[in-house]
Image (cartoon, rainbow, N blue to C red):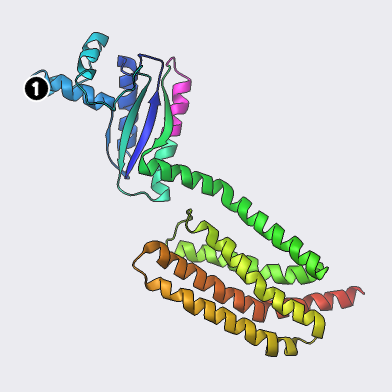
Amino acid sequence: DVYVALVRSDADQCNSPANLNLLEDLQWRFEQLESVQNTFSLANGVKAVQRGLSEGYPKWSHVPQEQIAINGTTGSLPPGFINLDCSFTPLYVFLKDHKAATLAEVTQTLTEFDTELQSKETSMRVLPAAGNAGIEAAVNESIEQQQNTMLWVIYAVVFFMCLITFKNVWHVLAILMPLAMTSILCQVLMVWLDIGVKVSTLPVIALGVGIGVDYGVYIVARYVITKDMSIVLSNTGRIVAFTGIALAVSVGTWMFSAIQFQADMGYLLTFMFIWNMVGALFVIPCLLSFFNKKNDESS
């Protein structure tokens, strides 16, 4: 897993002695992290050429402090270390894994170093990030920022659509509360199974809410007509139970897949289908009974 930090400076300054010293400082900070295996940058290339020009003598494996000497070494480096006007150079950070905690730790180290640079008299700035790990880090940040917003929007849409349908706030709350409980339990399950929130797992909660609300709508709609929960459960309840079990069994086979994404989907969807069914058959009747008693007492 490679995390590539982008080091920016003024034109013709990416290989200045001061900037290369700062680059080595940043590399040292990265290498102090347990999740980092190694780093490589323009400074390493300059030191390698400098040592090679001195018959491999280790003493000369250092960054020269004279610009003319550095220019002589950078000309021997392969392409990709600097751009045409020498204003960008990459810093490669090789990671042990690409877990969210690892990527967050590396990004935090980079951000803290760039903040320190802003208080110094240098044009050097460190920007995140490229490489497969850098892209995953950016995706993780976006997901972390948007996942709560997504949930609020989903529940708001479901709330207003159910309110338009039933025109009763208590009935809507009876539908939504089991869904909210299932969403919370699903996140607990993800922690227990060590399944991270990522692009592939983020829509699962939305899918669970979208399918789970159907069970509640069936129960409440039937209850509004009959006003008898025993009739609702003996008729509509059987249909809800059959649908929930059929969906759970069908997607449950995904848990045995060798593809990690499909296995994760199998665990999460099976859990949400089962718990949404349980919520519709047991929690919603209790909530409707409770809300009806409250309405009777208030009236």
User: Is 61 left or right of 255, judged from the image as shown?
Assistant: left
**Residue 153 percent across, percent down from the top left:** 67, 54
Q: Is residue 251 visible?
A: yes
Residue underneath mark 1:
57
Q: Is residue 181 visible?
A: no
Image quarter where the N terminus lies is: top left
- On screen, residue 81 above or below 265: above
The amino acid marked with disc number 1 is Tyr
Residue 87: image location, x then y, percent: 38, 19
- Residue 32 percent location from the top left of the image: 31, 37
Point 38% across, 46% down: residue: 102
Whether the magenta-drawn stretch holds residue 113 is answered as yes
Magenta span: 110-122
The answer to which image quadrant residue 231 occupies is bottom right
Query: Between residues 34 and 213, which one lies in front from this camera angle?
Result: 213
**Which quadrant holds the C terminus?**
bottom right
Q: Secondary structure at mark 1?
A: loop
Left or right of 290: which side holds 207? Answer: left
User: Does the magenta-highlighted stretch encompass residue 116?
Assistant: yes
Residue that appears at 42% across and 75% down:
253
* Residue 74 placement: quadrant: top left
Task: Say if 298 sits above or below 233 in the image.
Answer: above
Q: Main secondary structure of the magenta part?
A: helix
Residue 219 placement, left or right of 5: right
Is 7 located above or below residue 194 in the figure?
above
Label 1 CA crowd tier, 10 Å (few <14, some 14–19, many 20+): few
Which residue lies at the image location 86% right of the left edge and 74% below the top edge? Answer: 295
Quadrant housing residue 195: bottom left
Residue at the extreme left: 55
